[in-house]
Amino acid sequence: MSASFSPPDLSSRCQAEEWMDDFSISDARLRAALRDLRFINRLLGGYRSTNAVLDPVLRRQPSLRVLDVGTGSGDYLVHLIRRGVRCNCQVDAVGVDLNPVTVGLGRAHLDARLSPSLRRQGQIDVADALRLPYPDDAFDVTHAALFLHHFDDSDAVGLLREMRRVSRLGIVVNDLHRHLLAYIGIWVLSRILRLAPMVQHDGPMSVRRGFKRSELRAFASDAHLQSPRTRWHWAFRWTLSTISSGE
């Protein structure tokens, strides 16, 4: 590690913004970051964490309508639609993102990664996740991956309430455990692998903005979620879910 590395104070959530939240960055820097985030999700268990919660639902439902908030490049839409095929469940997935440039890149990713028939099962809309333009219970499940940590505490609670509002069966949040080993790991890995500069900055910052279990439970309580469950996954991921195992 270079001399510029210093262990951060992780006793509370960091409030500094990530570069990804700067919508003026809309060029190759953003495209490279979204590409590398897809790689990180494969390498560090992001998809597996979501699978652990949703697979039982996919296996017992013939079809599922899923909303993915903060969808970014749309990689979770691709994953969920393909996962549905493996589980004999037709997943119709809608993603939302507030950044129109990111939405355009996400739609292009769906075009490139899904067959024409599967492509019809996915769409991405420009929308504010805190004010979703959908009626109550419009979806079976609402999902958010590496998105909740972008919000301060009060807006994080608001996001959970909005996700709950539009979900018939429940919500799934997949996000980061704020831990020193997670911080050191992504700091080192992003530099060894020469990932995009935005990822080298935002990866460690995301960990600093991540959560302890007690914080997620407090948010769930403040959002009046019904029977929330928190589960730890490798590598340093939490899922917060309200989906009943008996649904």
Image (cartoon, grey):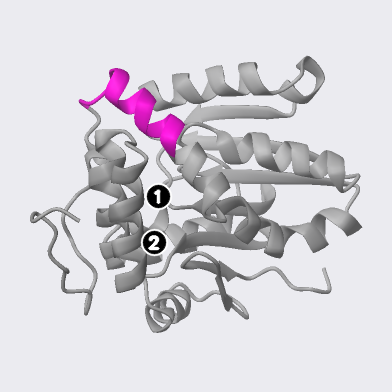
- Residue 124: image x %, image y %? 55, 28
Q: Earlier in the sequence, mark 2 or mark 1?
A: 1
The secondary structure that dominates the magenta segment is helix
Looking at the rendering, the stretch of residues picked out in magenta corresponds to 24-36
Residue that carries the numbered disc 2 in the rendered image: 158
- Residue 181: image x %, image y %? 34, 70
SS label for mark 2: helix
- Residue 103: image x %, image y %? 45, 25
Q: Is residue 32 magenta?
A: yes
Instruction: Give the left or right position of residue 39, taking residue 228 as reference.
Output: left
Q: Residues within 10 Å of mark 1 (few under 14, many from 20)?
A: some
Residue that carries the numbered disc 1 in the rendered image: 130
SS label for mark 1: loop
Task: Check if mark 2's residue and mark 1's residue have beta carbons within 8 Å.
Answer: yes
> Which quarter of the rendered picture does the C terminus lie within?
bottom right
Q: CA distance from mark 2 to mark 1?
A: 7 Å
Amino acid at circle 2? Gly
Q: Can see residue 99?
A: no
- Residue 27: image x %, image y %? 28, 18
Amino acid at circle 1? Leu
Instruction: Give the left or right position of residue 84, taking residue 16 as reference.
Output: right
